[in-house]
Structures are given as structure tokens and as C-alpha cells.
Image: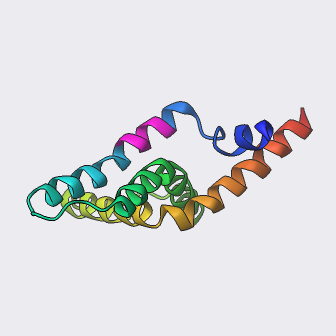
Amino acid sequence: MNHLIAKTFGGLSLTYYFRHFIFGLIFPALFLFMQSQTTQPTSIGMMVFMAISTLLYPYSRFVYESIIDFIMGQNVFFINTIVMLIAKLITMLLCWVCAVFIAPAGLVYLYFYHSKQQNNS
């Protein structure tokens, strides 16, 4: 069981996970700030969803970046900074919201990748 956890959840480097975890905190913070401006309390279900999405966001982002790297290759595009930042924010939001569905693909990939690395050594 420990090998499964180490190969999947421990599959990303700590710096990669921490960086994207910090970025993933933007959305629950923004939601909680907007929620604090209303009179309705945040539901337990929403809090659980935000916690799970934030914890899984780095794996979701890993899947997204892997797909984009495969499609784009080494090509570089020069575009307006504002357009790029808006596109980046939208993709971050989509990866965060859909982390529950996207992250399992990344976890499966990391498991097989690290299993193969272990067998080759």
C-alpha cells in the first residue's frame, strides 16, 4: 500500500507540487472572500470540494501541462501579455474545478511511470 501512495501521490517533485498547490489556493481564497460578502454561510460540501480540488490541483495541472507539451512541442508563441494571463487563469480555474476528474489520469500515469523506473533499476 505504501508503494502505491509513494508512486502516485509522491510522484511529483515537492517543489512542483508546492508551487501548484499555492496557485490552487487562489480559487478557494477568492471564493471564500466572495462568500464572506454575503449573508449565507459556506456549506460543508463546498468546503470539502474546495479542499479536495486544492489538494488534487497539482496533479490535474500536471496532466494539462503534459498534454500541452505533447501538442505544442518546443514551439514558442509571442502574444499579448494580458491575453496570455487571462488564458492562463482560465486554464488554472478549469484544472482546479475539474481536478477530481482530471487528477486520477495523472496519478495513474505517475504510478506506471515510477513502476517502470523501479523495474529498470
Q: Nearer the viewer, residue 7 or 41?
A: 41
Q: Is residue 105 magenta?
A: no
Q: How is the image coloured?
A: rainbow
Q: Split into 4 quadrants, where in the image is the C terminus?
A: top right
Is residue 20 on the magenta stretch? yes
Against 86, residue 113 (above or below) is above
> Where residue 110 sits in the image (x, y, percent)?
70, 49
8 lies left or right of 66: right
In percent of the image, x 42 and y 38: which residue is there? 19
Where in the figure is residue 78, as x and y percent of width and height?
31, 59
Residue 68: percent from the left, percent from the top? 52, 62
Q: Residue at x 90, y 38 (%)?
A: 120
For residue 101, side relative to residue 96 (left or right): right
Q: Main secondary structure of the magenta part?
A: helix
Q: Quadrant of residue 63?
A: bottom right
Chain part drawn in magenta:
17-22
Q: For the N terminus, which image quadrant? A: top right
* 66 or 34, nearer to the observer: 34
Is 10 left, or right, of 77 in this rendering? right
Q: Quarter-wise, where is residue 70 in the image?
A: bottom right
